[in-house]
Amino acid sequence: MAAFEPELSDEQETVRDWIHGFAAEVMRPAAAEWDEREEFPWPVVREAARIGLYSLDFYARQFFDPTGLGIPMAMEELFWGDAGLGLAITGTGLAAVSVFTNGTDEQIGTWVPQMYGDANDVKIAAFCSSEPDAGSDVSAMRTRARYDGAKDEWVIDGVKAWATNGGIADVHVVVAVVDPELGARGHASFVVPPGTPGLTQGQKFRKHGIRASHTAEVVLQGVRVPGHCLLGGKDRLDERLARARERANGGERSGNAAMATFEASRPAVGAQAVGIARAAYEVALDYARTRVQFGRPIIDNQGVAFQLADMRTRVDAARLLVWRASWMATAGRPFTAAEGSMSKLFAGETAKQVTAQAMQILGGNGYTRDYPVERMHRDAAIYSVFEGTSEIQRLVIARAISGMPIR
Ligand SMILES: Cc1cc2nc3c(=O)[nH]c(=O)nc-3n(C[C@H](O)[C@H](O)[C@H](O)COP(=O)(O)OP(=O)(O)OC[C@H]3O[C@@H](n4cnc5c(N)ncnc54)[C@H](O)[C@@H]3O)c2cc1C
């Protein structure tokens, strides 16, 4: 397994520069328009597919990069381009990762290609875990999946909230309760194939930021999926539930399907936040060098220059935490101090802080839609909410470092 190397190889730099070109030439000029339209940016995603940037092949290559830096490098560059468009391009990844994490080889081979489609017929996917009354507390989930043994089908009923690409996706991955007695340990994940009757889009949310990314409720009414759509298969589920029942009787804790997906994806989400923070920092640095007040560039004032020094320090520190966590995940190192959560927590808070500082450095201009930092600041706000709020990351870290059941 590769050692941790906080530097990209020549080959990785070439890929990064290629993504950067797309981010600068295609995403940046389109960002403000799609933010205002608040619609899924199909033309941008199709262009990404045309050049091979939105493709299973590209993500698989980054995902299996032995250094662990492929995914964070790609995420940072795309979200440097724009976060709303970036999430439209990468949102499918959460559903794909859940199949990689919980599915059999056959399920991975069947479903993941259908989530991306190809350049001539682009597809997208959604991962649906959160519910109106089950956000941070996944054990409050109500969506039920019941097994109909006579037909070897699962019947799913419930309402999912906040699903990125929800309702417009071709493939949905839905987490549902299969054994209510077991709380979060009684969950399983299901693929809902394209065009399955009973799955509809509920409310589409109008958001503060990342507005080019589609976020909606997904309503499931008597949705029937074949037995082979249960990720991991029935035998594995029965074994897992039996183990969970034994542990429950012995008072032990264990993880669940949704948490396994979130844990694997947290450093990648942190990398997105690094991209937004770096973008805002760069705009602020340029502005501070050229904006003249009192007869000199505003960066001549320590009050401004020191803010930029802090912003750059935080961005670099966030990237290092993200790269470390991503390398650890790839190298199979256990997150004994919740290093994945640490990276997401610090990078998310950095994006919020750095974009706010950037707005301040741009003065009145920073507050307008004529400059991108206002949008970046709105986009950054989601990074202390989704994929586990900052409070939940702190809870996970505190439990990991103390071994105590902190509440
Ligand atoms: C734009 C967007 C996209 C999303 N995409 C997806 C998606 O694709 N798939 C999906 O399944 N979900 C998705 N989510 C859902 C997201 O993961 C949840 O919003 C998040 O987990 C928080 O849940 P909640 O909104 O119900 O907040 P709540 O859990 O109700 O939390 C409210 C507040 O209470 C705090 N809090 C709660 N419990 C504790 C505690 N024990 N200790 C301290 N503080 C606590 C929280 O930190 C937060 O500040 C998305 C959300 C948004 C907004």
Image: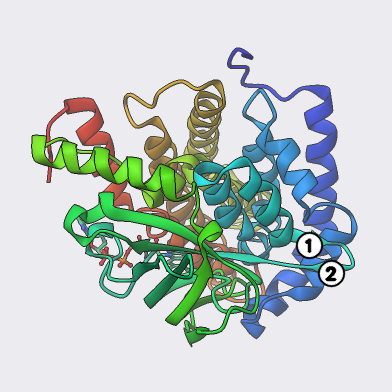
Image quadrant occupied by the N terminus = top right
Residue 4 lies, with reference to residue 140, above or below; the image says above
Q: Residue 210: image x %, image y %?
A: 56, 69
- The residue under the point 49% across, 46% down is 232
| Element assignment for label 2 | strand
Q: Nearer the viewer, residue 373 or 196?
A: 196
Query: Callout 1 environment at 10 Å: few (<14), some (14 to 19), or many (20+)?
Result: some
Q: State yes or no: Cβ of the residue under disc 1 lies below 8 Å from any atom of ligand 1.
A: no
Q: Amino acid at mark 2?
A: Asp
- The residue under the point 33% across, 55% down is 187
Q: Nearer the viewer, residue 187 or 297?
A: 187
317 horizontally vs 26: left or right:
left
Please indicate, yes or no, whether residue 195 appears anywhere in the rendered image.
yes
Residue 88 lies, with reference to residue 20, above or below; the image says below
The image quarter containing residue 73 is top right
Residue 117 tag number: 1
Looking at this view, name the residue that lies furthest to the front: 150
- The residue under the point 64% across, 54% down is 79
Q: State yes or no: Cβ of the residue under disc 2 lies below 8 Å from any atom of ligand 1.
A: no
Residue tagged 2: 121
Residue 350 lies, with reference to residue 2, above or below; the image says below
Q: Residue 247: image x %, image y %?
A: 17, 36
Q: Residue 330: image x %, image y %?
A: 57, 27
Q: Tell me whether the residue at label 1 lies in contact with that at label 2, contact meaning CB atoms closer than 8 angstroms.
A: yes
